[in-house]
Image (tube, coloured by chain):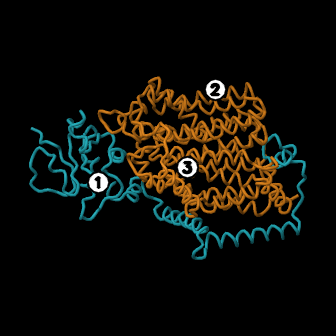
Chain colours: A cyan, B orange
């Protein structure tokens, strides 16, 4: 077995042994054998990956993986000149648009109260957000260096006393403001109290 | 600056493999350069953070340059500059090429090109990345510390110490993301993209060491195209990166048990150490390897190598333990620490594992082919020529994974959900291990010899 191993090794120490086989040229039999092997493999590749028979479960995974890569390559070509921000938007949809809006409309030292999961995904209403924009860490990725407070932390941490802004989502969040708002926009960000 | 940082990391990785031994092929050196170099870089970042040096582009690059210089000195001093000489072993394969091997390399390169592009193009968007790994790396880079970052302040983030909290996650992925963010990256996706790319090269390299080039390329293709693993390789989650370290670590350890070339043992130990630096449960692979090595040590009545292996493999874990202690990075316990018997839970785990092993949509034909080659290799294993040690490490790791899942108190989710949605990612580690077993089984090696004789240029 050892002899076998050393024969197949690719390590530099084996270089001397490997080079002792003097390379010959292309022969007719080499060409025929290689073309035959390539044709067989391409046939199997076509049968098992590219055009699978219905019900062939063992091959369907590879078919899915290959098509996934091809589909993504097409998307990449189509949107090659987009910015990272555009691409976040492509993946995260309105959740990213909304968090970007919060970022653009609050100062860097803002402490933002983010509404709960129920506010983002209200029962019985259409869900326009995706992902977990209500999650503290998830939202922090896009709002940093602003601090994010979630409703379950209210009254439990020193930071919940320092809230400067309230995020309004699907018309929810106005209840946290210290003042009444006349025209209530469904999605916005407002200071928690009006400056004197 | 980002490209400079990545090149520096790769060069450090190459020097680390050169320091271990000059006997690695350049395919292996290049393949291991990024995974090992990034492990080294993140350990250096953790040490800087421990001594309160702010993590900035200047500090991490300076520290990386110092490590590079130190490794260069050690390589020149102990291995000689000749060990870095380019030895074109790969060219020997080209001189004895066959069209099938070339075709397989082209397919691998094409598929990986598409996968790499996909990974780099799309920013992190999966839940686990944004609710943990990517965000922690991003905030650490901007707070200039990992241990003391704002998200780890319980006053600001009171749920951070809860069971399953991300504060206690092993740091490799988050720190490597912090590294690229510090160097000006807009997203962290360079890390998973490069990890998979270099993994494919390294996997081919270790396979090529042990079998013919055509079969090595074929097994690499099947391994990299395992559907669910391929899909996850372009996300920012930790599982595929752990699979890189764990599978290569087990493969090198198994290779050492066959060849007794010590550099394979040390590479195996370093990679298994890195696997625990990547995910805490990586300890199961170290445990499995240590048990097999202990049996080997007892048979040979020599324990020195086994002790070296264990010590090397546990270095990152020790650093992480000290780091956690000093930084107060802990979560409420979720492990059941006493022995108990729960037949329903055990049954759920066995059924869940079986459902995963037999799911072709997740892993393609990996596990059925593995099972066939176990049967095909049984005779050689009985005769002492088969790869019983590798098989033992794989089986022990699966058993340990089952035990870990069994001993977790599922307070945040049901065990059914964990088995259905999380456990499929745990099994990524076994995909490359199984293909390594298949490609290095005695019967395959005989077949490989025949294919090379039949197809290659003489």
Q: Residues within 10 Å of mark 2 (few under 14, many from 20)?
A: some
Q: Which residue is mark 3?
A: B240
State the separation of the CA atoms marked 1 and 2: 48 Å
Q: Which residue is mark 2?
A: B70
Residue A31 pos. (x, y %)? 84, 68
Q: In the image, which disc is placed on residue B164?
A: none
Secondary structure under the numbered disc 2 in the rendered image: helix
Q: Could you tell me which residue is drawn at 61 percent across and 45 percent down? A: B397
Q: Residue furthest bottom?
A: A54
Closest to the observer, A104 or A152: A152
The chain containing the residue under callout 2 comes to B
Residue B55's place in the image compared with B194, above or below, is: above
Quarter-of-image position of residue B7: top right
**Mark 2 vs mark 3: in front:** 3
Q: Which residue is mark 1?
A: A98
Quarter-of-image position of residue A194: top left
The reply, left or right, for residue B120 in relation to residue B162 is right
């Amino acid at each position: 077995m050892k002899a076998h191993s050393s024969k197949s090794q690719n390590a530099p120490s084996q270089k001397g042994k490997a080079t002792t086989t003097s390379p010959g040229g292309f022969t007719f039999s080499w060409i025929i054998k290689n073309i035959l092997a390539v044709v067989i493999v391409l046939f199997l590749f076509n049968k098992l990956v590219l055009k699978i028979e219905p019900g062939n479960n063992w091959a369907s995974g590879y078919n899915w993986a290959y098509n996934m890569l091809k589909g993504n390559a097409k998307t990449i070509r189509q949107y090659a000149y987009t910015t990272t921000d555009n691409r976040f938007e492509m993946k995260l949809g309105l959740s990213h648009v909304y968090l970007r809006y919060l970022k653009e409309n609050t100062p860097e030292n803002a402490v933002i109260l983010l509404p709960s999961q129920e506010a983002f995904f209200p029962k019985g209403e259409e869900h326009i957000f995706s992902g977990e924009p209500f999650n503290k860490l998830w939202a922090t990725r896009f709002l940093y260096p602003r601090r994010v407070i979630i409703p379950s932390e209210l009254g439990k941490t020193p930071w919940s006393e320092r809230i400067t802004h309230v995020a309004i989502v699907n018309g929810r969040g106005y209840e946290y403001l210290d003042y009444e708002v006349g025209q209530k926009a469904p999605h916005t960000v407002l200071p928690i109290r009006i400056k004197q | 600056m980002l490209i400079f940082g990545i090149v520096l990391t790769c060069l450090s990785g190459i020097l680390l493999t050169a320091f271990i031994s000059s006997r690695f092929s350049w395919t292996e050196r290049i393949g291991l350069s990024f995974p090992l170099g990034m492990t080294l870089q993140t350990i250096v970042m953790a040490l800087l953070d421990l001594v309160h040096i702010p993590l900035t582009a200047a500090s991490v690059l300076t520290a990386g340059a110092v490590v590079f210089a130190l490794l260069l000195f050690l390589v020149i001093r102990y291995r000689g500059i000749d060990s870095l000489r380019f030895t074109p072993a790969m060219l020997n394969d080209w001189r004895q090429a066959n069209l099938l091997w070339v075709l397989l390399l082209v397919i691998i390169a094409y598929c990986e090109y598409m996968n790499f592009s996909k990974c780099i193009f799309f920013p992190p968007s999966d839940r686990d990345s944004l609710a943990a790994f990517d965000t922690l790396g991003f905030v650490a880079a901007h707070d200039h510390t990992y241990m003391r970052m704002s998200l780890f302040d319980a006053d600001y983030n009171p749920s951070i110490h809860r069971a399953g909290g991300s504060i206690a996650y092993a740091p490799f992925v988050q720190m490597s993301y912090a590294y690229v963010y510090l160097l000006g990256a807009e997203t962290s996706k360079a890390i998973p993209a490069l990890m998979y790319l270099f993994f494919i090269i390294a996997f081919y390299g270790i396979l090529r060491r042990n079998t013919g080039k055509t079969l090595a390329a074929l097994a690499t293709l099947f391994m990299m195209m395992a559907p669910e693993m391929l899909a996850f390789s372009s996300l920012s989650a930790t599982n595929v990166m752990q699979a890189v370290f764990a599978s290569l670590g087990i493969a090198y350890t198994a290779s050492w048990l066959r060849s007794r070339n010590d550099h394979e043992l040390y590479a195996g130990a370093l990679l298994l150490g890195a696997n625990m630096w990547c995910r805490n449960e990586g300890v199961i692979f170290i445990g499995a390897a240590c048990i097999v090595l202990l049996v080997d040590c007892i048979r040979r009545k020599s324990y020195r190598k086994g002790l070296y292996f264990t010590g090397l493999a546990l270095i990152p874990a020790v650093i992480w333990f000290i780091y956690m202690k000093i930084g107060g990075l802990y979560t409420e316990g979720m492990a059941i620490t006493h022995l108990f018997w729960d037949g329903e839970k055990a049954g759920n785990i066995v059924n869940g594992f079986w459902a995963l092993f037999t799911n072709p949509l997740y892993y393609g034909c990996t596990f059925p082919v593995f099972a066939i080659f176990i049967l095909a290799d049984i005779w050689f294993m009985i005769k002492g020529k088969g790869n019983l040690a590798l098989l033992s490490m794989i089986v022990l790791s699966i058993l340990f994974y089952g035990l870990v899942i069994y001993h977790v108190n599922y307070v945040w989710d049901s065990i059914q959900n964990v088995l259905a949605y999380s456990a499929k990612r745990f099994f990524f580690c076994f995909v490359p291990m199984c293909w390594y077993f298949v490609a290095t089984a005695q019967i395959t090696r005989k077949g490989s010899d025949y294919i090379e004789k039949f197809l290659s240029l003489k």
